[in-house]
Image (spheres, grey):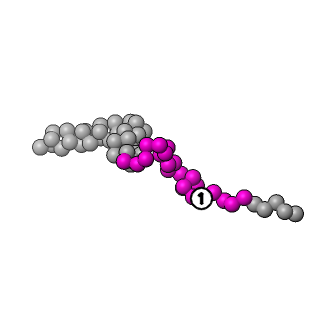
């Protein structure tokens, strides 16, 4: 029974060391695997118009030109 406890403890220690050592590649892999997917362009839209940018500044209407009367 003591051998089983030591084996389980050794497995936990080794796996924690491996996870700690490879934590950066593992975080990148999990982010790539389970992260948010990019938004795809609408395929049913008008093919003549280019797809809209995903930036909030580009979707807002442009500011009116300033009056330069001085």
In this picture, which residue range is highlighted in magenta?
44-65
Is 46 in the magenta? yes
Quadrant position of residue 59: bottom right
Q: Is 32 located above or below residue 64 in the figure?
A: above
Residue drawn at (15%, 39%) of the image: 3
Which residue is nearer to you in this view: 43 or 17?
43
Which residue is nearer to you in this view: 47 or 25?
47
Left or right: residue 11 compared with residue 1? right
Residue 44 percent coordinates (x, y): 36, 48
Residue drawn at (53%, 51%) of the image: 55
Can residue 38 be seen here? The reply is no
Quadrant position of residue 56: bottom right
Residue 60 percent coordinates (x, y): 57, 58
Question: Badge 1 is on which residue?
Answer: 61
Is 38 in the magenta? no
Tell me the element at label 1: loop
């Amino acid at each position: 029974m003591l051998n089983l406890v030591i084996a389980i403890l050794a497995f936990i220690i080794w796996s924690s060391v491996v996870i700690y050592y490879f934590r950066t590649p593992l975080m990148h892999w999990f982010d790539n695997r389970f992260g948010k997917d990019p938004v795809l362009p609408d395929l049913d839209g008008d093919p003549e118009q280019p797809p809209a940018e995903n930036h909030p500044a580009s979707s807002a209407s442009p500011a009116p030109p300033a009056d330069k009367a001085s």
